[in-house]
Image (tube, rainbow, N blue to C red):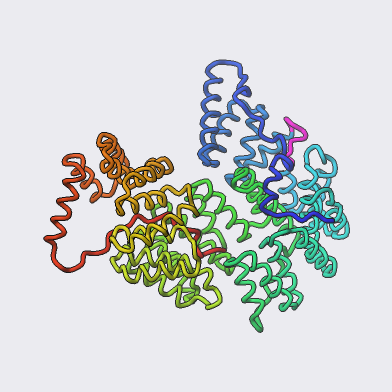
Amino acid sequence: MTQRISFSRLRRARAAALFAGTLLSSVAALSLPGAAQARSVSGAYLAAQHAVVAGDYAQAARRFGDALAQDPQNRDFLEQALLYGVVAGEMETSLDVAERLVARDANNRLAHLTLAVAEIASGAPRAAEERILTLAPQAFPPIVGKLLLGWAQMEAADSAEALKTFASMDRGALARLFGRYNGALAASIAGEDKVAEERFSAALADLDEPNRRVVEAFGRFLEARGETDKAAALYRDAMEGLAGDRILAAALERAGKAGASAPGLLAADAKQGAAEALFGLSEIFGAEESPAYALLYLRLALHLDPSSPAVRLSLGRIWESLQRHAEAEKAYAAVPADSGVYYDVAQLDRADALARMGKVDDAIVAVNGLIARTPRDADLHVALGDLLRGEERFPEAVRAYDAALALRPQGEAARDWPIYYFRGVANERRGAWPEAERDFRKSLEINPGEPSVMNYLAYSWIDRDENLQEALEMLKEAVGLAPNAGYIVDSYGWALFKLGDMDEAAVQLERAVELDPTDPVINDHLGDAMWMVGRRLEAEFQWKRALSFQPEEKDRLRILRKLDAGLDKVVLEERASLAAAPADPAPAPVSPEAPAPEAPVEE
C-alpha cells in the first residue's frame, strides 16, 4: 500500500536529509597567521554569529563578508557568506562567492545549488543539466538534484526527458510526492493533459491532509481546461480540512462564477516550475526547523520567478516568525497588487507586521484600504476590529465587529465565536456590560467549553460580584480544560477568594504565580490571599513583587496603600467610599484580557 504522508510531518524529515553537512564553521576555523589579524577576523566572525542568532541575516552576510575579506580562502567563511548572502537577497554578490567556494570545495552543495538555479534563470539550462548529471549525488542530494534536473530539461525544451526524470523520483514517500507534483506541473506546461491529471491526482492521494498549494495547482489546471465544476468540487472538498482559507475560498468563488476568467496555470513555464519546486522545499524546512534554509530556497525561487506572490508571502511569514517585522513588512509590500487574493492576504499580514512595529495607524490605513476595495469581506472588518481593540478604541472596534457579523454567511456560524468574544471584550472595556455579557454567552453557545471565553466572562462576574457560584463552576471547568494557563488558574483562585474560601484560594493563586510568575495582577491577588490566611510577611513580599512588574496605575496605588495600611484597612476604606458614592452605577470594572484565541481571519 502506498504510504500517505502529511506536509506537516514532512518538515520533520529534517533539512539534513536534503542538505546534510552544509554549515560546518566553528571558531576553530580561525587558524590565522598573526594575532592582530586573528582578532580582526574573530571579531567579524563573532559579530556574524550574533547576527545569525538575532535573525538579522543581512547583517550576518555583511559580517561574514568582513571575515572573508580577511581570510579569502577560508572555506567555512565562504560557505556562510554564500548562505546568508542569498538569504539577504544579494544574489549577484553571492554568485561570485559560489564560484570561489566551488574552486575551494569542488562538491559543495550550497554553491552548486546556487549556480544551477542561476543557470536555469539566465537561460543556460544545459549548463545546469550538465552540472547536475556530472556532480550528483555528491553535490546534489537525490530530491534536490532531480527536481532541478527535470526543470532544467523543461527549460531546454526536452519535456519528454523531464517527465521521465520526475517519474523516476520513487524512492520514499517524500521523493514520490515531489516527483508526482512537479511531474504534473511539467506535463500541464507541455500540454500533456492526461498525464498531468493523473499525476496531480496521485500527488493528492499521497497526502493524508489537504495541501493548499497542490490543490490550488490542480484546480487552476482544471479551470484552464474549462472543467470549472470539477475544480469547484476540488476546492470545496479541500476546504473541509482548511476552513477559512482565503486563497481557496477565492478560488472556489471564481470557479463557481459563470463567465469568470480562468486564472491560468500555477506554473506557466519552466522557470516558474523550478521556482515552485524550490518553494516546496522551503516548506520542508519550515520556520521552526531551519529558518535560514527555508529563506534560502525562497530567495532562489524569487531569482527564478521574481513576481511570485506565494513566495513573497511565505518569505514575509518566515521573517515574521523570526520577529523581524521590518523585513516581513517589506516582503508583504512586494506582493504584486494584481495578484488578487494573494495581495489581500499579504496586505492583512503587512498590517499585522506594521502593528507589531508600533505603526498601528499605518496598519489601520492598510486595512481600511482593503475594505474600500472589497467592502463586503467580513474578515477585513474583523482585522480592523482587532487593530482598533488593541489601540483601546473600543467603540470603533465594536462597530467593526458589528459589520463583520452582518456580512458573515449563515453557514459559517461555527467560525464566528471569536468575533463575539472580541466584540464582548470591546463592549466590556467600554463599559457596556449587558452587551458584553450577551456576546460572551453567544460565543460559548457556538463553541462551548472555550477556556479563554469562559475565563473572561466568569472573571467579569467575579469583579462585579455577580453570579459568583456560576462563575466558580465555570472557572473550575476552564482550569480543567487549560490547567497550565496561569491567568485562568488566577481567575479560579480569585473566585474562591471572593467566596471566602481563603485557604484554597491561596493554594490556587500560588500555583497561578508558578505558571505566570511575572504577572502583576496574579502576584497582587496572591498577596491578598496570603494576608487573609495570616501570612502577612509573605503577602507584603508578593505585593512588592507585583509592583516590580509595573502594574496599571490604579493597581499600583492600591498596592502601595495596602503596603502602608494593610489589606483590612484598604477594604474598609473602599466599602465606606462605595457607601458614600452616588446611586448611579459606576462603569464596569476592567478585567484583564486573556491572550486572544486564534483569530477567525485565515488565509
- Residue 200 position in % (x across, y down): 78, 64
The residue most toward the left is 580
What's the magenta region?
Answer: 103-112
Q: Quick one: 288 or 538, which is closer to the camera? A: 538
List x then y, in percent, for residue 57: 55, 41
* Secondary structure, magenta segment, majority class: helix
Work out whether 527 lies above or below 371: above
- Is residue 361 in view? no
Would you say residue 105 sits in the magenta stretch? Answer: yes
The relative height of residue 45 versus residue 291 in the rendered view (above or below) is above
Identify the image quadrant of residue 541: top left
Q: Is residue 20 visible?
A: yes
Q: Whole-percent x and y of residue 339?
A: 59, 67
Residue 192 image point, x, y percent: 84, 67
Give the residue displayed 37% in from the left and 60% down from the top. 471
Q: Quadrant of the C terminus?
A: bottom right
> In front: 490, or 197?
490
Above or below residue 528? Residue 209 is below
Q: Which residue of the protein is positioned furthest toward the top in this rendering?
A: 34
Q: Is residue 337 left or right of residue 19?
A: left
| Residue at 72% from the left image edge and 59% from the top image edge | 208
Say which of 308 and 541 sits in front. 541
Which residue is painted at 42% across and 63% down in the image? 386
Quarter of the image where the N terminus is located: bottom right
Identity of the residue drawn at 19% across and 50% down: 571
